[in-house]
Amino acid sequence: MKPDYPRLEWDKTTNEQTQKPVKYESPPKTPNRVTYLRVPLHIWRLIALRYDVPMPEHITVTEEGEALLFWAWVMAHPEIPVCLMEGEKKAACLLTLGYVAIALPGIWNGRVGKEDLEYLHPDLVPMAQKGRKFVILFDYESKPKIKQQVFAATRRTCQVILQLACQCEVAVLPGPEKGIDDWVVALGKKADKAVSTMIADALRISEFSQRFFINRARGLCKYKPHVIVNTRYLSTVIRSLPQSGLVCLASDMGTGKTEILAMMRIDNPQLSFLNNGHRVTLLKNLSDRLQTAMYSAISCGDWAKAKALSITVDSLYKMANDLQAKDILFIDEACQYLSQLGLSTESRRPLEDGKRVRYYRLNPDDVEFVQNVLEYRQRQREHRKGSAKSRKLRMRHIRLGCKLSMELTRRPHPPIMKMEVIIGGVWTQMKQTVFLGGNGLNIMLSWRLSVSNPVWNRLKNCSVH
């Protein structure tokens, strides 16, 4: 309940009232409960359409408009992701947009117990079927102390979810609006696509931890920016971009990097355009916003004929035999893109024994690098297997009510990446401009780029913006 005239918070240390109002009230001396909101029929239809899941034939709707058994339907379909929100208003906002959302009474209330022995909140356990994806979406915070608390609560909630063989990702609000409800109102008609992009770009807990601890200024000292702006949206200040060379855009999510490219596409429809990414869901959203053909929507033989095309890095090799020169290449989330290119060992091309491999064009000196990559991937697999066994052992101890102390092995570090690993000749065909974008751009720029290949011999003479 949110009172019209809230009382002031009581400080137990000084036994005095503070000036901070208590915004929400819950029943005293009762445990915190998770909120499953009542859902009307049109919201149910919107969610079923979004995830392409059939609805029951007969649905009972009460006089108040509630469609009964909605949550039982969600429980019966573990392929539908569930978003955990900080408060009822945020959950209601996301439900209205067609996402399944459950309200937590606070950032710490998705789990119960102490750090050495904690488990998922009992109200959430019915939804935690094996393989179900949970997306944690808490409020945007700017104060360092509160950000630290939000990170700790997010990490520990993720851990208890992963213990139940579920998936867990973290969606990050760009700010400055505090909650998803305020952000949606501020975006207006663009809210649906923006929220879809944010959830599709949700981070694994390892990526979220890395983003939280890494200093974003690292690696940029060598590359002084030509233009620095302090604005809510880049497109309101930056009207044009350089017409040649390598153009780098380093800016937070939701600041309009894609809008700048969309404006360029509208102003220069005669230029051929290649949008390249590492995740299909992100690529589909960008394809709509940048008005390009999606590679999965047309036949492979027509890819080269498309004036503007969106394609994943894993499918680039299919264009090698019929590659056409492109005026503009756009790479979104450049750091993750290069990590996918250099460290993944899978590809769409199967071998005779049914296994999949990634094909590289390498110099003879890079044999040692390839061996380091393969050894690193093997260590990663062994680490995941060890973590799975540890989780099973931990759950066994939890069921017995015993405390578990476990020493985790340190996660192996990736080898130093040398950029002779190239994209099947694609970059050698670019005529004018290459765009790299993403929050992790500073990490990519700090990598050591080798110029022994003709690709980099061409790029090293370009100006970097």
Image: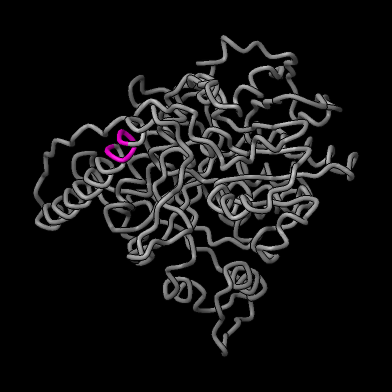
Coordinates of residue 355 in the picture (x, y in percent): 35, 60
Q: Outermost residue toward the bottom?
A: 58
Residue 258, position as x, y percentages in the image: 73, 39
Left or right, residue 283 beside residue 185: left
Q: Measuring 90% from the left and 39% from the top, which residue is drawn there?
A: 267
Is residue 444 placed above or below 222 in the rendered structure?
below
Q: Is residue 415 above or below residue 357?
A: above
Image quarter of residue 337 = top right
> Can the viewer see residue 196?
no
**Residue 318 x %, y %:** 59, 55
Locate the C terminus and report the quarter of the image it occupies: top right
Which corner quadrant of the image does residue 407 belong to?
top left
> Which quadrant holds residue 45?
bottom right
Q: Is residue 449 above or below residue 253?
A: above
- Residue sitting at x 38%, y 25%: 416
Which of these two is toward me, 327 or 184? 327
Scheme of image coloration: one colour
User: Furthest residue to the front?
Assistant: 364
Percent from the top left, x then y, of residue 170? 47, 44
- State yes or no: residue 7 in magenta: no
Q: Which residues are magenta?
A: 371-375
Q: Residue at position x 68%, y 17% from top? A: 461
Observer able to see residue 58: yes
Residue at 19% across, 44% down: 117
